[in-house]
Image (tube, rainbow, N blue to C red):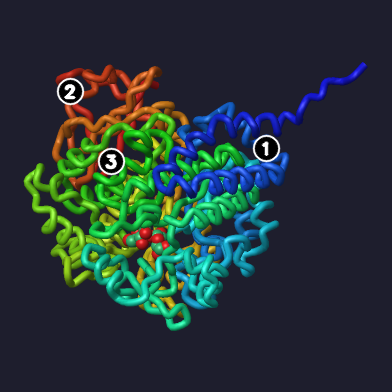
Amino acid sequence: MVPDQSPDVHDELFELRLERWLPDCEAGLRSVYRPEEMAPLLAAVESVLRGAHAKRRPSLRRLDQRRALRPDWFQRPDMLGYAAYTERFAGDLAGVQDALGYLEELGVTYLHLLPLLTPRPGDSDGGYAVADYRRVRPDLGSNDDLASLADTLHVRGMSLCVDLVLNHVAREHDWAQRARAGEERYRRFFRLFPDRAGPDAYEATLPEVFPDFAPGSFTFDEELDAWAWTTFNSWQWDVDWSNPDVFVAYLEVVCHLANLGVDVLRLDAIAFLWKRLGTACQNEPEVHDLTQALRAALRVAAPGVLLKAEAIVGPRDLMPYLGTGRHHGRVSDLAYHNSLMVQVWSMLASRDVRLTVHALRQFDPAPTTTSWLTYVRCHDDIGWAVDDGDATAVGLDGHAHRGFLSDFYCGGFPGSFGRGLVFQHNEATGDRRISGTAASLAGLDAALELPDGPARAAALDSVVARLLLTHAVVMGFGGIPVLWSGDELALRDDPGWADETGHADDNRWAHRPRLPWVRNVLGECVDDRVDPSTVTGQVFGGMRRLARARRGLPQLHAAWGTEVLDPPDPGVLALLRRHPEGPMLGLYNVTERTVHVTGWLLGLHGLSDCVDRLSGERVLVSDADSVELAPYATRWLAAG
Ligand code: OTU
């Protein structure tokens, strides 16, 4: 008897995925590349995907299948992220393995390790100038160490995110070296100009990203004998995505990282990928076509792997990164909610939620298969992405409000509690971005300026309350909340940030502190997290409680939208999450006043008899009664 010639099940699934996703990939590519470029491009794409599939480890194939059976795995309320530089968090990749217990204690299920691929020597913008995408930074470990960390994370039910820097490479990257050596194929990987005519024409409408330490967007390179496009630092060369070879080269990198076991690729500075004369060269439609093509291709080779858009752009430009119009649900699975982050700090400074309510209401619901990534802050500065129209709608002047926020958070506004640093003061626009850890921005340094005594104790209580409030907003919004390393311990700005080689003119290093596994000069230490008499212990304990409550609230699944209610008080943000199991009402008091919210609001949403899922307290109110919110208090109200 002849046995069935049944093909390998994984190969068969691969063919089915090709059938399912290739049209999506092709549609994206067709919108970008010339018709005559398509046939060789599609052939190259398919060949990369076949090669990647052949090399995918059995454990990752199993993970792909598990995720195919649970496509909402990343939208569930048990998702909680933590982002850190490997060396600053735990020394190296082996150290991260040892520190997983710490993350689990917090409830973390998603770990974003900042750039860990081999960067250029010397200053590398925190690793965002990649010299070799194929090799882990040797001082952090090997590719095998990364794969082994990914395996351990998967066994523990966690996932791993790493950066994919795809707008630029280091001047030292192989492609750039070959371009400098005159190889035509690689000169075409970059946007080069023989003289200033091109750069001048583009610069007429280009905003500067680093006006302080890297003014302009082009750099003349002697070896190239040309101007290279350098949006960021002079040694970060923008690649030319209008060249289909660049697409294929990055697809190879994507597959390589996916096959090491990475679960989420953070698309760094994705907004800048496409350049068009006469524009700001950000958010161009081709960016979304390229993302669609990349994602569809990735679904074929490594279907369990997600794309996360890092587009730190104005509120009106944000939604397309999760997909609008023909890109709806077809681009990144995740995107940073930069606007929410900005609004959190705006509410805290102004003690008023009305701008936030208006700004958040301008967002359409996210595609139900995607998720926002919510955060209080990250490794970068905060740029005040407040839309002028939103400001005007609530009677504010956008420019003046942005100026107020900068003043407030650098301690320049009378009575302000923020002690951040001004980053990239742009003389031309008046823009001032802000650096600082969450604790420094929320008033820890200001509190410690007070003499020891009751006033200081009260100020410290407010700092803890503000830190928990800001994190409650992002954990209660829906989506994946990501904590920035050190904020869970209320770490202040690193006093020695400028001392490290190459860091002195980039004060973002102030808010990228090393975790104090042993007591540091300020006397702070990770061990204090279990001591409720310390600020560190109160913040860490509070974050754990938030994470625990979040896990038990199905309403926080990212597929459901957030309704921003009319504020019951100008100082209270009210967010409603409707769900078949009953609604959840989040109330956030952004002021240092005690506020009363009418019971009528709870009754309206069927919550007159409910439980505050954070404190466990039963809340029973009639329409005529009210619920009390202490200064900076959060209430997560839902059925018991
Ligand atoms: C990203 O930053 C990274 O997060 C930064 O650390 C890098 O310096 C930069 O790219 C270059 O690789 O481009 O789309 O406030 O938010 O530089 C967003 C400015 C970016 C940063 C911006 C950001």
Residue where numbered disc 3 is placed: 633
Query: Quadrant where the C terminus lies?
Result: top left
Q: Where does residue 544 sit, x and y in percent of width and height? A: 46, 43
Asked which secondary structure carries label 2, the reply is loop
Instruction: Please report the residue visible at 59 percent of the width from the left and 26 percent of the height from the top.
Output: 69
For residue 61, which numbered disc appears in the image?
1
Q: Where does residue 538 sit, x and y in percent of width and height? A: 41, 50
Query: Quadrant where the N terminus lies?
Result: top right
User: Looking at numbered disc 2 in the image, what kind of residue is underneath it?
Assistant: Asp
Asked which secondary structure carries label 1, the reply is helix
Ligand 1: quadrant of the figure: bottom left
Q: Nearer the viewer, mark 1 or mark 2?
A: 1
User: Looking at numbered disc 1 in the image, what kind of residue is underneath it?
Assistant: Arg
Residue where numbered disc 2 is placed: 625
Q: Are marks 3 and 2 in contact (CB under 8 Å)?
A: no
Q: Does residue 528 appear left or right of residue 174 in this picture?
A: left
Q: Does residue 565 appear left or right of residue 526 in this picture?
A: left
Asked which secondary structure carries label 3, the reply is loop
Q: Earlier in the sequence, mark 3 or mark 2?
A: 2
Which image quadrant is residue 567 in? top left
Q: Are marks 3 and 1 in contact (CB under 8 Å)?
A: no
Q: How far is disc 3 from disc 1 in space, using C-alphas?
A: 45 Å
